[in-house]
Amino acid sequence: MDKIKNNALVKKIGFNRVILIGVLILMYLLFGALCVALGRASFFTMNRIYSALNYAYFLGFLALGVTFVIATGGIDFSVGPVMFCAALIAGYSLNTHGVPLAACLLIAIVVGTVFGIINGILVAYLDMPSFITSMASMMLAKGVGSVFTKTQSVSWPQLADANGWYRNLVKITSGTTIIPTGLFIFIVAAIICAIILNKTKAGRYILCLGSNKEAVRLSGVDVRKWEALAYILCGMLAGMAAIFYVGAYTTVQPGLGDTFNNEAIASCVMGGTSMSGGIASIGGTFIGVLIISILQEGILAMGFQKDYQYVITGIIVLVAVWADIRSRQRRN
């Protein structure tokens, strides 16, 4: 084991990330074998991969945003409903009020950012617990989305429609060739988030807040500003997630989105972000999102209900949190 850890390539990638990549590959192979054993359609097809990627895009943006919040030692349980609220308001503006599509995509990002600002002010400047604040924001997002659309579901344009060009953000289809443009955008977004978190003053302060907020405050740093920034980034990314959700699935229903909170948090924790704050890995979050996406696609491929995914995801979160606690105990 030590020989593997000391390998130059493993050190560069990170041992934990290498383990996650191994889990991802094994999970993909396992589902493929189980589909064969159960007499199901082959799991080793490009359609399955594209389907898993469609799920990974919007979940990925949610998870990237939550990574910043958890890095501060906080939590955000509102990202899923905020994503749905942004998609509902933007879609309703498009269908009912004739707002141009480009403006509607911007509206989705603005709605998510507004919720991020609200959470940031409440947590950083009014000293409210992030758990309670995000739960309240979750209910607020559900209510606002339902009221704005009069409790009606919203359908976004298909690719063949005049306003369907936004679907090219998810994938471009040319004959039998499919270009997963969403994957490229997701990778670029992850790289930008990694740079912000690891190479900028804002990212360093966000991580320091999770390690010892009081020590950072006593050193003269405006901790409120940087803590609020983490929630604002989370809200903005939730708004971007809304664009990729409707680009893949078209119809948005009011009052939903809760389950995506858990999956986004699971992706972060699985990827090495500590629930206690101070330690975060954008690369780990990226791989964690792919694992969750392959998991949900594999369960559906075997003909099981999505409930099984909730059970497995819950177990993954418990194991990841336990591993994080043990790791901190060893370091201490």
Image (cartoon, rainbow, N blue to C red):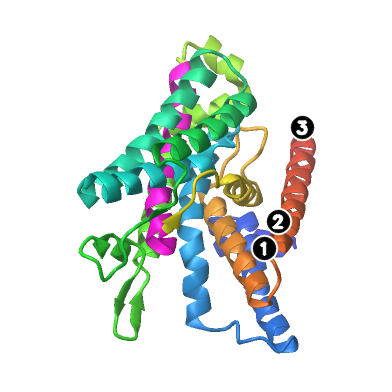
Residue 108 image offset from top left, x and y in percent:
35, 43
Give the residue type that dot 3 points to. Answer: Asn
- Assess whether mark 2 and mark 1 are in contact (beta carbons under 8 angstroms): yes
Q: Secondary structure at mark 3?
A: loop
User: Within 10 Å of the Cα at label 2, are there few (<14), some (14-19), or many (20+) other Cα atoms?
Assistant: some
Specify which label sits upstream in the sequence, 2 or 3: 2
- Position of residue 133 relative to residue 163, above or below, is above
Q: How far apart are labels 1 and 2 at the CA level?
A: 7 Å
Local secondary structure at mark 1: loop
Q: Quadrant of the C terminus?
A: top right
Closest to the camera, between mark 1 and mark 3, is 1
Give the main secondary structure, helix, strand or loop, of the magenta stretch. Answer: helix
In the image, 180 versus 215, the foreground residue is: 180
Q: Residue drawn at (40%, 42%), measured in percent from left and top?
A: 149
Q: Residue at x 50, y 60 (%)?
A: 56
Q: Which of the labelled discs sits on residue 332, or is there none?
A: 3
What residue lies at 74% left-to-right and 44% top-to-bottom?
Answer: 321
Give the numbered dot on residue 310. Answer: 2
* Mark sitting on residue 306: 1
Q: CA distance from mark 2 to mark 3?
A: 33 Å
Quick check: can you spot residue 201? no
The kind of secondary structure element at disc 2 is helix
The CA distance from mark 1 to mark 3 is 39 Å
